[in-house]
Image (cartoon, rainbow, N blue to C red):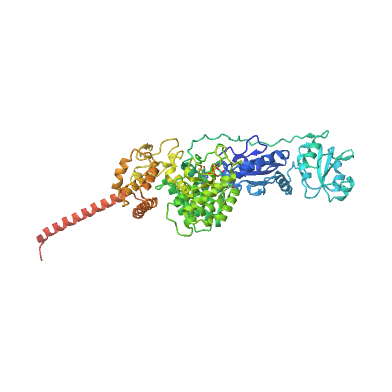
Amino acid sequence: QPGGLYSPGDPLVLLQVDTLERSVLNSSSAWLVEFYASWCGHCVHFAPTWRALAADIQEWSPAVKLGVLDCADIANQKACGDFGITGFPTLKFFKAFSKSPETGTKVFHPGDSIQNLRQNIITNLEMHKETWPPACPPLEPASEEEIRGFFQTNNVTYLALIFETNDSFVGREVTLDMLQYENVAVRRVLSSEEELVKKYGVTAFPSGFLLINNGTFSRIPVQMEARSFYTHFLRRLPGVTRGPYTLTSLPDTPINTTSTPRRPADRSKVYMADLESALHYALRVEVARFSVLTGEQLRALKYFVAVLAKYFPGRPFVQNFLRSVDRWLRNVRESRISSSALELVLTNRKEVTPAVLSNNVTWVGCQGSKLHFRGYPCSLWTLFHLLTVQATRHPVSPPPPGPLEVLGAMRGYIRSFFGCRECAQHFEGMAVKSMDKVRSVDQAALWLWSRHNRVNARLAGTETEDPEFPKLQWPPPDLCPACHGVVNRRHVWDEAAVLRFLKAHFSPANIILDYTEPETARVVRRSREAKEGAGEWAMGSSGPRKPSIVWMNPKTQELEEDIVDLDSFSDLHYKSKALKAAAMVANKGRRVSKRDTIPLLLADDSHQAFDYAGAWESLRRRGMGSKQLIGALEEDEGDAMRRNHWFRMLGVGFSRLDVSLCIVLYFLSSMCLLGMYTFFRMRHRKGHPGFPTA
Ligand SMILES: Cc1cc2nc3c(=O)[nH]c(=O)nc-3n(C[C@H](O)[C@H](O)[C@H](O)COP(=O)(O)OP(=O)(O)OC[C@H]3O[C@@H](n4cnc5c(N)ncnc54)[C@H](O)[C@@H]3O)c2cc1C
C-alpha cells in the first residue's frame, strides 16, 4: 500500500516503480537505496536512523544519493524482485553509471549506527575505479608532491589538510561535507606521510591545517578535532560560498500518501479478509520474490502449501485453489522451480472447478491506525494460530511430522520467506530452544500462543507498536476472564482455559466474511451447455453486490441473479455440521440420516449464519464430547468424499444429473431393445409355419 515509512519532507528520494530505474541506473551520482516493507517492524525501527543519516549526509548528494522504496506497495513488487530483494530492510549501493539492477551491492548494517553507515558509504564510493562520480572530490590520501604544486593546478584560495591515521574517516567526511562549497578544497594526509608531518609540525592525529594560496598556513583553530568542528570552520571562511549544486531532486511522480478508510473490526472475531490477504501476500508476494526455488526453500513451500490445503478452513473456491497448488507442488519432480512457473500455478482458475484466491490485500482485524502498522505480520500470526487450532480437530498424523506438522510448516516458511529477516531470526531462536518439546497438537497451539506473547512483551512500547492497538499479553481479561488467575498475588495463566479459548477463537465458526471479495463467490455459467454439465465459475463485475450464483442467459449473455447464494455455502456447511450433531445427540449418538436433520433445519430457520458455534457448545454441554462429534462428522464427511470420489471417477467431469440421465436413457434403450427383440421373435414364430418346407 502506498504511504510507507517516509514522507516527502524527508531529505531523501522517495522512489516508486516508475522512478527507480530511471533514477538509480546510469546516474552520475552513486545511490544507496533502502528497500523496505512498511509492515516490517525492523524497518519501522530502522526508519529514524535512515532519516537521520539522510539529513547528516544531505550535502553529499551530488556524489551519492539516498533513496527508499517500499516493497510492501504492491505496485513496487516486481521492481523489488528485479532488484533481487528478498528480505527487509535491504540496503543496496549502486555505483555511479550502474547499468543494471544486479550491479547493486548489499550494504551490511550491524546495529543502527549512523557513523557505521556513513563510513560504509565512503568505502563504497572508493570502490569506483574508472567511472568516478563526477561531483565527488578525490578521497585518496594526498602526497607531498601533490600538495607542493596544489595552488598551481587548482584555482582556489584555501586548501585544508586533515592529518589522520589510515583508519580514520574524518578527512574524507569533511571532504564530502565541503563538496558543494567553492573556493576551498580538502585533502586528507596520512600520519605515515612523514615529510608533510614534519613540514607542518603535526603532533596529533587528527589535526587540521589551513593553507592559503598566498603561501601562508596555520592550524585550524577548533575546540575538538572532529568532523563537525572542521566543517563549521571551513564554511565560514571569507570568500567561501555554497556552489550551484542543487539538493536532492525529487521524482516526477507524486507520492500517494492517501490512507485507506478505517474498517470497523470486532477484536473477538477472526476475519476471512485478513486470512485470504495473508495467503495472497505469502504466496504471491513473499515467495514470488525468489526467481528460483530449490532445496530447503522448495521443501518449505511444499510443506507450507500442504498444511494450508489440509487445514485452511476457507471458502470452497479458496480451498480448491490451495488443493490445486498443493497437487501441482506434490507432482514437481525437478529439484528447482522458477517463479514464472509458480506464478502460472498461482493464477486464479475459473473453469469447471473454480480455484480462486483474491488478488487483493484488505486488512480488517489487522488494519492499523497508520499504513505501516500491523497488516501482513498480524495476519500471518492469525493464520498460523488458526492452523494450529485446526490441527487439533484432526486425528494426529503419525510422525513425521506428528504434532509438529503446522509449527514445522510455519518455521520453514518464516525461515525461508518471511521478508522481515530479523523477525525470522528471532523466531528461529525460539524454535531451536523449545519447539521439539511439543508432544501433542494441543501443546502446539499453546506453544505458538506463548511464543507470540513473548514477542508481544518484547515489542510492547517500541516504535513498532500501533498506539491504537497496544501489544498486550493475549487474550486480555475482557476477552477471556477464565484464562487469568492469581496465585500468591502473581498473575498466572490457566492454560486449560487458554486452550479452550484458542479453540473457540480460532474456530471456523468465529471467522467472519466481512470485506471479503463478494465477486469471488459468484458462479457464472456461460450457456445452456453449462446448464447441462460443463458449468464455469467466473468472477463477476466489480461492485458491492450481494454474492449469489448467477445464471448467464445465453441470448443476452448478461448475468441474471437468482438460484443460490454461494457465499452462504460455507455458512451452511457449518450449520449443517451443527445440526447434524444436534440430531446425533437427539439420537444418543446414533448415526443420523438426512431425515433426522430436517426437523432441526426447519426449527432452526430463523437463526443467523454462524450462530452455530453456540449450538455446538450446547451440544457438548448436553453430554457429547466434541471429539466424538467431530469424529462422527468427519466420518460422515469422509463417506461423502469417498462417494464423491467414486462419483468423480465414474462421472469424469459430468454432473450427477448427467449421470442419472445416462442411467435412465440406458435403461429405456435396454427396455426398447428387449421390446423389439420380443416383437420380432413372436412374428418369427407366427410366420414360421407359412414357409414352405422342403
Ligand atoms: C513469526 C513472527 C515473528 C516476528 N518477530 C518480530 C520481531 O522480532 N520484531 C518486530 O518488530 N516484529 C516482529 N514481528 C511482527 C510483530 O510480532 C507483529 O506481528 C506486528 O508488530 C503487528 O502487531 P499487531 O499489534 O498487529 O498484533 P500481532 O502481534 O501481529 O497479533 C495479531 C493478532 O493475533 C492475536 N494475538 C495476539 N497475541 C496472541 C497470542 N499470544 N496468541 C494468539 N493470538 C494472539 C490478536 O488478535 C492480534 O490482533 C513478527 C511477526 C511474526 C509473524
Quadrant of the drawing holding the N terminus: top right
Residue found at the very far bottom of the displayed protein: 694
Task: Give the image location of residue 689, x and y in percent.
Answer: 9, 61
Give left or right: position of 124 versus 513: right
Residue found at the very far front of the displayed protein: 488
Residue 525 in view: no
Nearest the eye: 522 or 374: 374
Residue 167 in view: yes
Task: Give the image location of residue 182, x and y in percent.
Answer: 79, 36
Q: Which corner quadrant of the figure contains ligand 1?
A: top right
Give the mark count.
Answer: 0
Give left or right: position of 126 versus 436: right
In the rendered image of this protein, does residue 408 appear above or below residue 180? below
Residue visible at 83% across and 49% down? 191
Nearest the eye: 459 or 318: 459
For residue 522, what is the image quadrant? top left
Quadrant of the drawing holding the C terminus: bottom left
Task: Give the image location of residue 455, x and y in percent.
Answer: 57, 47
Task: Give the image location of residue 678, x and y in percent.
Answer: 17, 56
For residue 617, what is the image quadrant? top left
Give left or right: position of 267 versus 60: left
